[in-house]
Image (cartoon, rainbow, N blue to C red):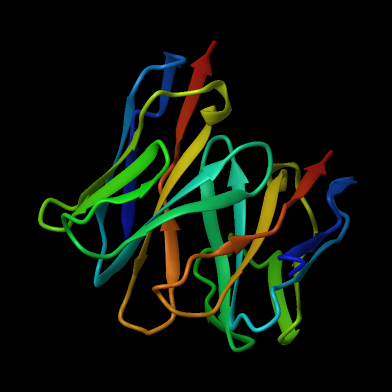
Amino acid sequence: DAGVIQSPRHEVTEMGQEVTLRCKPISGHNSLFWYRQTMMRGLELLIYFNNNVPIDDSGMPEDRFSAKMPNASFSTLKIQPSEPRDSAVYFCASSPGSWNSPLHFGNGTRLTVT
Amino acid sequence: EDKVVQSPLSLVVHEGDTVTLNCSYEVTNFRSLLWYKQEKKAPTFLFMLTSSGIEKKSGRLSSILDKKELFSILNITATQTGDSAVYLCAVYAGGTSYGKLTFGQGTILTVHP
């Protein structure tokens, strides 16, 4: 089991540029989550999907953020245009999809926007 | 809005000490409470608790849930430097069958030799 795979591991970009983060969940997991972690705010849930359908995107900061899950094995989180305050570690996590299953996290993407 | 609060925010101890980390929650339709350990990278799963009063144990770590008072504790006995990490508490809540996990802000534990 390869676990949750995220790419890239690190991303450095300039303000105004588009950023795309990628995630491959664990095979067979029905739920996928995107979290953002900063020192100030901790782990914040941005959006989660169940069976490829977005269930709750109330944590997405603003219209600059969008997420898609075109199939069961792939999801993207896009920021356009990026701003310095978007700098954080972005984690993707997956689970079998019920409240009695723990989330399994990827190693995260560290985003720095200058 | 669902809320998970951890205390203390940080803790510094020496090897061999015993520590207790606290987690309180206010959520709608509580389902389960989870503890994670985060070192340099991703959070790794420690325990899941669904019933009050039943202790979960793994080596020197143990945890218990009180659903009446809405809190959980994580105990670590005979701490080691390898226990230094951020410990995260999270709660599954909601009326649907699939889970939305809300995290607390974490407790930073530092264990000195």
Q: In this view, does A69 lie to the left or right of A53?
A: right
Between B46 and B87, the one nearer to me in the picture: B46
The residue that appears at 44% across and 64% down in the rendered structure is: B101
Q: Position of residue B85 (x, y in %)?
A: 54, 32
Q: What is the quadrant of residue A66 in the picture?
A: bottom right
The residue that appears at 44% across and 41% down in the rendered structure is: B105
Compared with A67, A65 (above or below) is above
Compared with B66, B76 (above or below) is above
Q: Where is residue A56 in the image (x, y as percent from the top left)?
A: 50, 76
Between A63 and A76, the one nearer to me in the picture: A76
Which image quarter holds the N terminus of chain A? bottom right
Q: Where is residue A80 in the image (x, y as percent from the top left)?
A: 79, 63
Q: Residue furthest left?
A: B68
Which image quarter holds the C terminus of chain A? top right
Between A19 and A15, the one nearer to me in the picture: A19
The residue that appears at 36% across and 28% down in the rendered structure is: B77
The residue that appears at 69% across and 47% down in the rendered structure is: A89
Compared with B13, B54 (above or below) is below
Q: Is residue A69 left or right of residue B54?
A: right
Q: Where is residue B70 in the image (x, y as percent from the top left)?
A: 18, 53
